[in-house]
Image (tube, helix red, strand yellow):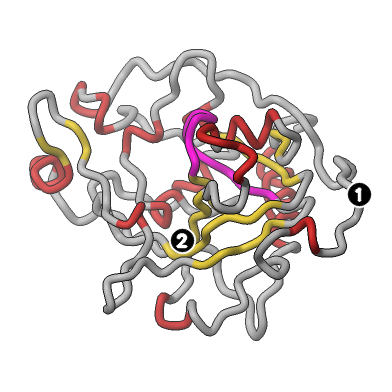
Amino acid sequence: MKTRRWLLALVSGAAFVLAPGAAQPVGAVAATTLAARTVALAPAGDTSEQPQPPPTQSLCRPGTPPTAPPTTEFYDNNPMLGPATLPFASPVGPLLAGYQRFGALTESEFLAQYTTGTPAAYVYPPANGFVIAPDGRPLKQAQSLLAGYRLDRFGFTGGSFLAPLGTPFSSRALTPQSLNTPANAPLANYHVYCVVKPFTVDSGPIASWFAQPGMGTQFQLNLAYLPQAGATLTVQWLLDNGFLVEEDLTAGA
């Protein structure tokens, strides 16, 4: 039942993505076609100048996901490598289909390539994780998200990156520790959000990193589109100011 509800929410969110031609599979946007693709859910820019329906939560189902037991056992006793046993419960489990913690690398090769320093810290990709074009520029463009569109995120609300609901974990090119469950958080700290008031983000394909293929779509918040946020533009700011609500995909399952 949980899986069916998760799939229903995924289809509901995906229905708001309008693109010409055949629909693209989630997490398989080709960089070579990005420039020609109509990515925007509505014309980008100041959405206040565009005809919009009154803000409403009727398209969203606000809810708070239940907390899960925090991760206490880690792969090779290293929290950086994620939980010893990968989550399998919905809605997180289906996103891990085919996921390999170290890709085609060994554990030691993975740590040597993607960590640095003592104590070790992850080395994150350039260009905020967007695919970089041959001319050296990140492949991204402004995209407006309309009311009712669903997004998700692994991590606390203090961050500025989101993805279309249901993007496979391997297509996000995240660290394995992103699957850890902190105290007082849902499983793998995974959150689903629904757009209440339209806003604009930078959108583009995710570069391969952390031994993962990437090529999913990521949304990065940009102060240029929401200057009223000042220096506090995060997912939490969007929640506090009525642009997003959180949803619970396990409710009623």
**Quarter occupied by the N terminus:** top right
Give x and y (percent) for residue 87. 45, 33
> Which region shows up in magenta?
150-160
**Which mark, by number, is residue 216?**
2
Q: Nearer the viewer, residue 102 or 88?
A: 102
In the drawing, does residue 139 fall left or right of residue 25? Answer: left
In the drawing, does residue 31 fall left or right of residue 106? Answer: right
Q: Is residue 156 magenta?
A: yes
Mark 2: amino acid: Gly
When asked about the image quadrant of residue 6, the answer is top right
Whichever of labels 2 and 1 marks the residue nearer the N terminus, that label is 1
In the drawing, does residue 104 fall left or right of residue 94? Answer: left
**Quarter occupied by the C terminus:** top right
Given this view, does label 2 or label 1 mark the residue nearer the observer?
1
Give x and y (percent) for residue 81. 25, 33
Is residue 60 among the parts visible in the rendering? yes
**Which mark, by number, is residue 54?**
1
CB atoms at circles 2 and 1 under 8 Å apart? no
Q: Nearer the viewer, residue 67 or 203?
A: 203
* SS for dot 1: loop
Residue plotted at (27% across, 78% down):
134
Residue plotted at (51% across, 34% down):
231
Q: Is residue 126 magenta?
A: no
> Could you give the CA–CA distance between mark 2 and mark 1, rounded to whole angstroms?
31 Å
